[in-house]
Image: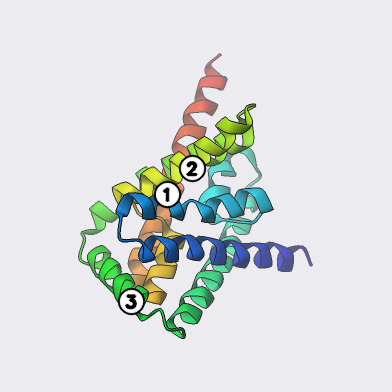
Amino acid sequence: MKYLTTFAYALLAGLAISIGGAAFLASDSRAVGAALFSVGLFAVCTLGLNLFTGKICYALDNPPAYLGNCGLIWLGNLAGAFLAGAAFRATRLTGLAEKAAEVSAGKLADSPGSIFILAVFCNVLIYLAVESYRSNPHELGKYLGLFLGVAVFVAVGLEHCVANMFYFTMGGAWSPKAVGYLFLMSLGNAAGGLLFPLCKKLKQQSE
């Protein structure tokens, strides 16, 4: 039952991020789209859903079995993003599918090194956003940190593996290369999410 709940909450997180992705695709302004995308992480944090890019940031604070839990969450996120993308493709919003195909093509034309680096920077921002929500004592600060972390990574064009699960599905862009790039993005997100926690842990050990 525990694993089923974990997977279900991960699936819902994939749906939430996909709604944010759809809002980004629907906007003619990149800045506005980046701001609207933040609804996805807002839903994840306020509803306590399971998002891989957020959960992986706390791997150093948990036993090794936690990594298996993160793997299950990744699969749930994929299921949610795939369902959302397939559902949107079945609607009249064909323009979103065309834009998702363009976005996906740009990502798949990039080099592996670039993809990895952009994924690392993405999850540095996700960690800051989630940690702000978890730890900032001021209500405004909690949500401002959440909003800025997401809006900045989307505006810059950094790589978020769960958002890309949705874009690849919405744009009909799945291929062996897309799968490989998705794993590369996930590794980059994991590395970026663990960067600040690792530095913090090393600092604590040296004191």
Instruction: Check if mark 2's residue and mark 1's residue have beta carbons within 8 Å.
Output: yes
* Residue 75 position in % (x across, y down): 55, 68
Q: Amino acid at mark 1?
A: Ala
Report how far apart the C-alphas of labels 3 and 2 lie in the structure. Answer: 26 Å
Q: Percent x, y for residue 172?
A: 35, 80
Distance between mark 2 and mark 1 Cα atoms: 7 Å
Residue 147 in percent (x, y) is at: 48, 42
**Position of 102 relative to 59 (above/below):** below
Q: Is residue 1 left or right of residue 59?
A: right
* SS under mark 1: helix
Inter-mark Cα distance, 3 to 1? 20 Å
How crowded pointer 1 is (Cα within 10 Å; few <14, some 14-19, many 20+) is rated as many
Q: Residue at x 25, y 58 (%)?
A: 112
Q: Quadrant of residue 132?
A: top right
Q: Which mark is residue 95?
A: 3
The residue singled out by tag 2 in the image is 147
The amino acid pointed to by label 3 is Gly
Q: Which residue is mark 1?
A: 35
- Direction right: furthest residue: 1
Query: Which kind of residue does numbered mark 2 sit on?
Result: Phe
